[in-house]
Every structure is written in structure tokens, then in C-alpha cells.
Image (cartoon, grey):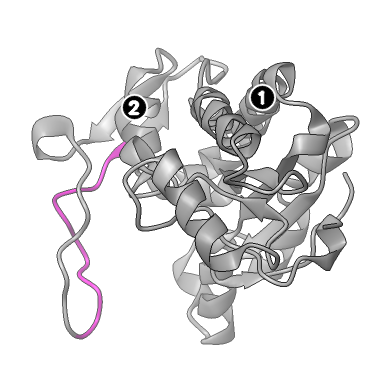
Amino acid sequence: MDVSDARVVLVGSLPFSDADESFRAVSNSLSGDIGWVPDGEFGARKLWTPMLPEFVYSNEPDLEETLAPPGRTMAAPPAFDGPPPTDMDGIWNFRIKPGRRLRFHDLLYGGFAVQSYGVFRRLRDEGVLPDDVRFQVSLPSPHSATDPWFEDADQWPEVEVAYVEAIAGEIDKILEVAPAGDLAFERSWLGERVLCLFELSGQAAKFPVEGSAEVLLKSPAAQLSDGVVNLPPFGFAIVSITANSVDG
């Protein structure tokens, strides 16, 4: 199948316990309709970006914690009715230390992808996955991955730039192991979509950032496809609404 003929596109998260289970389930249900398969974002990534404060930001020497959850472990928030709560115990916040230039040393996405690609390749060799299906690497957009965990909005641009620089390194790790023709990259824009919804509802003034449309268009995420040569298809996923992949 040519990737442009794919009829179904999945976001990264799936309700399975590991990559093997995810790949088998997708192949059994969607074979012939899907051009690339995610590993399901299991384990540490199960809650999506809350992995980052627990396993990455809390270990960065250039950052200081201003708020940490009980037990220093992220957990899914409890279900609630009505308006969302204004405060939750599970929040983790950070600031860049005075006088430091922020660099993220390891965002972990490359290592996770390399491990899951090994499972993908084994199942493809065994005939469980079709030969023409690609391995999907799902990467959160800079706003979604950073801003909710940094309390000072004035620091958001610097944090986002550091994230983009580090994500480029994660992509390099993946490309060292997997050929570009085996890969498809997805960027998830959940945080940007939330900003757009607040702006449309007239509540954008609650957020100390420029207009959400400008945030989406000016996001450093654009550098990921513009600045890395010979990337495979780069997709944009806005929650459950997914646009066609485009060549990077």
C-alpha cells in the first residue's frame, strides 16, 4: 500500500499493554486500511505528556521544581462532574534556574521508539504485519509537551525551543536504527487545540500568551519538518482529528 492510500490514521495511544499486543491488534483489525502503526504509547507514556515531568524534567539540572505531586509520581486525575477543578494534587511545575540556558539531555522518545521498532520489524518479518506498513513515531508538539508543566509563561518560548532541539536529537536516534522508508512521524497538537477552543469561547484572556492561531502557526514545531533532512511523512494530529501526512 502506498502511504497516501491509507484510509485510517491512528493517534499514538492504544489500550494495550505493550508494542507486540498493539501491533497485532491493529494488524488484525485494520490490515489493508492503515499505512502506519503506532506502538500504543504503553508504560511510562500511558498518560501521554505527564511522563515528561516525572522522568525528564525532574532530573534536569537546569530546572527547579516549584510544585511536585505526592510521592513524586504522576497519576491520572480523578473523574469529576461539572467544571474542572482549579487545583489537583498530581500537578508538577518547574522553572528554569536563574542564569541557566536550558538544554534537555534525553527526552526518552528516541529510546522508546527504537525498542518498539525492533518489535515492529520482528512482526513484519514473521508476516504478522504487511511489508508495506510503516512504524509510526508519535511526538507531542512543543506546547503540549512543555507549557503545562512550566508556571512562568515568560519562559515558555525558551522551553519550547529547548524541546525542539532535543526532539531533533530523538529523531536522529531513531533514524540511526530505522530506515526512513520504514517510518512515519505524527505530531499531536492537543495543547494548541485547547488554546484555540478557549479563544473561540472568549476565554483566551485567561492565558498569558498571544492569540492561539498565532501560537499554532508560529510554534517551533514547524522546525521539526523544515530543519531535518530526508524525514519520512510528517503528520499532524489534533486530538482525534488527523490531517494528511506531508513530506518533510
Principal SS element in the magenta part? Answer: loop
For residue 174, which numbered disc appears in the image?
1
Q: Nearer the viewer, residue 76 or 102?
A: 76
| Residue 151 in sight here | no
Q: Quadrant of the N terminus?
A: bottom right
Magenta segment includes 84: yes
Q: Quadrant of residue 79?
A: bottom left
For residue 111, which numbered disc appears in the image?
none
Q: Nearer the viewer, residue 151 or 161?
A: 161
Judged from the image, the secondary structure of the residue bearing numbered disc 2 is helix
Q: Which residues are magenta?
A: 82-93
Q: Quadrant of the C terminus?
A: top right
On screen, residue 152 above or below 61: below
Tag 2: residue type? Phe
Residue under pointer 2: 55
Magenta segment includes 20: no
Tag 1: residue type? Ile
Judged from the image, the secondary structure of the residue bearing numbered disc 1 is helix
